[in-house]
């Protein structure tokens, strides 16, 4: 593992480190401990070159200004909680309203802005991962109880990135923590994701209402633009949606014995890079960069405009604390939150 200083935070002057892990095929995973962010992922292409498929920025200063959660761990509770005044075990808690009148992606000072402690994960052949640790005090952004979160990123010689997230609490609280990297399998020279081919192994999705908050209805994907069970060219699919883009949650079949199962396949014909997403989570949110604009400049000088990159966030049902029919996102002492997601890369 290679380590170097990435910068110092503007407010607290804490030193942020960059960690680079390489496997035997030359694949390189780059992580910083500000927001537990993945800031780069170089994978082999059909043409024999390494392509960086994760979008990011050149400097810590740009990550501190980032409002798109690029590469970050999002928490305590991702996406929109509406109403933000929630009941947990008979007690009411008022989460911060940081996006209009809703609580979004953990509040003003969520996990994406935290400085995480880091240790190496070692195997027989040396360091092949990093373990990041963060303590969120009771009352942070309105959440009850102290929450201890551990994130592990492992790079295998099978060209997989294994993301493990575990959280334990001091008292009952809500937790829904995804990894929020933006992908473009064409690399920084590819201006859009339109040529990507995507499939999602889901028979249903969550209907969305005002402000992208689920209505509580679980709807069949059959005969809708959300039926991606067969591979679809993403550009054609995007332009057939009512909002000219996806920011939607698909409901997966629960994985047996908490074993990661296939949720998404993403393929880029020009580079030959194929990415499988396997997860133990009950669903996946695909966001196609609908709100990116030309003011966002990536680490290679590329313009990260609308539909230039996409997120595949594996997580629990959205706004589940306010929808009693959704799988519960409350955890309690002695009942840890844990899930595993695998990004498996290959060349077709």
Image (tube, rainbow, N blue to C red):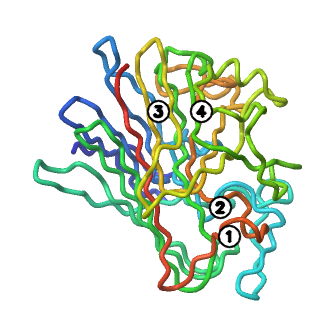
Determine which residue is flagged by label 2: 106
- Label 4 vs label 3, nearer the camera: 4
Q: Is mark 4 on a helix, strand or loop?
A: strand
**Distance between mark 2 and mark 1 Cα atoms:** 7 Å
Label 1, on which residue?
A: 141
* Tags 4 and 3 touching, CB below 8 Å: no
Separation of disc 3 and disc 2 at Cα? 23 Å
Rendering coords of residue 163 (x, y %):
40, 52
Measured Cα–Cα span from mark 1 to mark 3: 29 Å
Disc 2 secondary structure class? loop
**Location of residue 49 (image quadrant):** top left
Front label number (2 vs 1): 2
In the image, taking residue 154 as reference, residue 181 lies left or right, namely right
Give yes or no for contact between labels 1 and 3 (Cβ–Cβ under 8 Å): no
Residue at far right of view: 210
Mark 3 and mark 2 lie on one chain; the one further toward the N terminus is 3
């Amino acid at each position: 593992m290679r380590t170097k200083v990435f910068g110092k935070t503007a407010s607290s002057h804490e030193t942020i480190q960059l960690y680079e892990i390489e496997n035997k095929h030359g694949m390189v995973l780059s992580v910083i401990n500000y927001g537990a962010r993945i800031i780069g992922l170089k994978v082999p292409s059909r043409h024999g070159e390494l392509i960086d498929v994760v979008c990011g920025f050149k400097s810590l200063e740009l990550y501190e200004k980032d409002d798109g959660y690029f590469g970050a761990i999002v928490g305590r509770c991702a996406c929109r909680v509406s109403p933000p005044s929630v009941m947990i075990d008979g007690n009411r808690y008022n989460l911060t309203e940081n996006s209009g009148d809703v609580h979004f992606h953990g509040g003003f000072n969520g996990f994406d802005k935290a400085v995480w402690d880091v240790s190496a994960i070692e195997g027989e052949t040396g360091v092949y991962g990093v373990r990041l640790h963060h303590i969120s005090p009771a009352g942070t952004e309105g959440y009850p109880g102290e929450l201890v979160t551990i994130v592990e990123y492992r790079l295998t010689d099978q060209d997989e990135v294994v993301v493990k997230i575990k959280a334990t609490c001091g008292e009952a609280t809500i937790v829904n923590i995804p990894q929020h990297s933006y992908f473009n399998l064409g690399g920084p020279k590819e201006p859009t994701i339109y040529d990507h081919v995507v499939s999602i192994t889901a028979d249903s999705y969550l209907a969305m209402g005002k402000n992208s908050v689920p209505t509580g209805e679980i709807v069949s994907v059959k005969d809708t633009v959300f039926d991606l069970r067969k591979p679809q060219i993403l550009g054609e699919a995007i332009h057939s949606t009512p909002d000219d883009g996806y920011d939607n949650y698909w409901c997966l079949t629960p994985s047996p014995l908490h074993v990661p199962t296939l949720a998404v396949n993403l393929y880029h014909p020009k580079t030959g890079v194929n990415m499988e997403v396997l997860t133990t989570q009950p669903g996946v949110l695909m966001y196609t960069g609908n709100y990116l604009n030309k003011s966002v400049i990536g680490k290679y000088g590329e313009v990260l405009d609308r539909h230039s990159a996409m997120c595949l966030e594996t997580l629990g049902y959205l706004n589940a604390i306010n929808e009693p029919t959704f799988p519960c996102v409350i955890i309690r002492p002695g009942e840890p939150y844990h899930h595993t997601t695998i990004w498996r890369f290959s060349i077709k």
